[in-house]
Amino acid sequence: MAHARLLRQRLLLLFLLGLLLLFSPLVLQVEHLAPWQAIPALYLYLFLVWAGLISVAAWIVARART
């Protein structure tokens, strides 16, 4: 039971981190950066944060199964 509770807490923390990274004034700061390899910095930031959140969520769930 404690193991499932810890899993829920970690996923909730990851969700809150995602909210902070995707819906905060931090995103507006990235918008003003110069493009990298002709890719707008905002698109790159959003994609990397999204991919990172999915990767960390998969790692948390995979660790919980073992």
Image (spheres, rainbow, N blue to C red):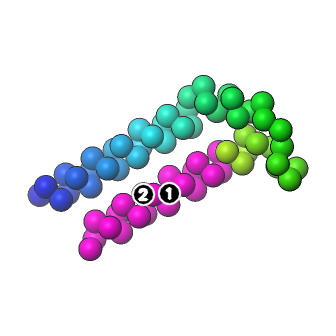
Q: Position of residue 51 (x, y in %)?
A: 58, 56
Magenta stretch, main secondary structure class: helix
Q: Position of residue 53 (x, y in %)?
A: 50, 52
Q: Could you say whether the residue bearing mark 1 is in a helix, strand or loop? A: helix
First to last magenta residue range: 46-66
Q: Residue at x 50, y 61 (%)?
A: 55
- Give the image quarter of residue 26: top right
- Residue type, mark 2 in image: Ala
User: Left or right: 27 with respect to 5?
Assistant: right
- The number of numbered badges drawn on the structure is 2
Q: Badge 1: few (under 14), some or many (20 or more) residues near its Cα, within 10 Å?
A: some
Task: Farthest residue to the bottom: give it.
Answer: 66
User: Left or right: 34 with respect to 8?
Assistant: right
Q: Residue at x 56, y 28 (%)?
A: 24
- Gap in Å between the C-alphas at discs 2 and 1? 5 Å
28 in magenta = no
Which labelled disc corresponds to residue 65?
Answer: none
The residue tagged 1 is 54
Q: Residue at x 57, y 50 (%)?
A: 50
Q: Could you say whether the residue bearing mark 2 is in a helix, strand or loop? A: helix
Query: The N terminus lies in which quarter of the figure?
Result: bottom left
User: Left or right: 7 with respect to 41?
Assistant: left
- Residue type, mark 1 in image: Ile
Given contact means CB atoms under 8 Å apart, are the residues at marks 2 and 1 in contact? yes
The residue tagged 2 is 57
Task: Farthest residue to the top: give it.
Answer: 25
Q: Residue at x 19, y 51 (%)?
A: 5
